[in-house]
Image (cartoon, rainbow, N blue to C red):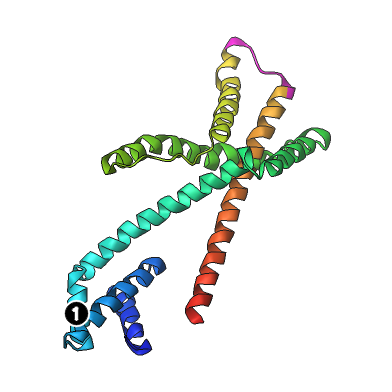
Amino acid sequence: MLTPDQLNQIDQHLRKENWLINEDLIAELTDHYAAGIDERMAHGLSFTDALCAVHTDFGGRKGLLKMEEEAQKQQAKKYYRQEWQLIRSFVQGPRWFMAAGLLAGMFLLNVVFGQYDQLKLIYNFGFGFVGSAIVGHILAQPILAFQHLRAGSSLQSTSSPVFISLYVLTAGLLLINKYVLPAYNLTLPTDLIVVLVTIIETLSLVYLLASLVLIRRLIRNERNRRTLKSA
């Protein structure tokens, strides 16, 4: 059994000598290092020699950094899935009433209280950031499916078909009204345009709300991890 000082030396070895920063990977590697070192010390090696041997088994600094790069990619994919799971919960899951409340609130602000022009910032945000996120998500699906196919596993969809379909349909109608219909001296009814803009604004707020919930969850998990580490 290694001493607290030896465990701290492993931690510093991973952080300072090998430049690792991923906390989950460092915790996992510390356990592997400790088991490997303990086994080698039982066969007569000193702590330092055992540490060097285990380090070599992991491919040295290059091997560890490659492991961290892969761990970061997997972590990013996990957060990406969690974000879309939250979006789905707001549109077609247990939090649907919050999205309904946002839609009703935005409709009241746009129509009843006449804040249509003042709320255009949310509308522009929806067409920009949220729109690019949806396009990126759609384009990434074939790539992810191919990767899972090569790995022999199935791709579990976590996206929200309702959210994406509603956004694409609404944005498509607004773009047609702006760039296609004027060529034929046509335009959508003003009331319909207000409704479409309100839907885009609501979907943008849902996306933002899901992102904030995810950030809050990550901060809470990190705080709990640090509390357990210091205990």
Q: Quadrant of residue 53?
A: bottom left
- Image quadrant holding the N terminus, namely bottom left
Residue 186 among magenta residues? yes
Which residue in the protein does label 1 denote?
52
Question: Could you tell me residue 229's position as x and y percent?
Answer: 47, 78
Q: Can residue 17 be spotted in the picture?
A: no
In the image, what residue type sits under mark 1? Cys
Q: Which residue shows up at 52% across the image and 44% down it? A: 84
Residue in the foreground of this view, choosing between 65 and 90: 90
Q: Quadrant of residue 169?
A: top right
Q: Can residue 97 be spotted in the picture?
A: yes
Question: Could you tell me residue 186's position as x and y percent?
Answer: 64, 13
Q: Is residue 26 above or below residue 77?
A: below
Residue in the foreground of this view, choosing between 12 and 105: 12
Left/right placement of residue 170 relative to residue 137 reads right
Residue 128 among magenta residues? no
Q: Which residue shows up at 74% across the image and 23% down it? A: 191
Question: Could you tell me residue 226's position as x and y percent?
Answer: 50, 75
Q: Chief secondary structure of the magenta span?
A: loop
Q: What is the count of numbered marks?
A: 1
Specify few, some or many for label 1: CA neighbours under 10 Å numbering under 14, 14-19, or 20 or more: few
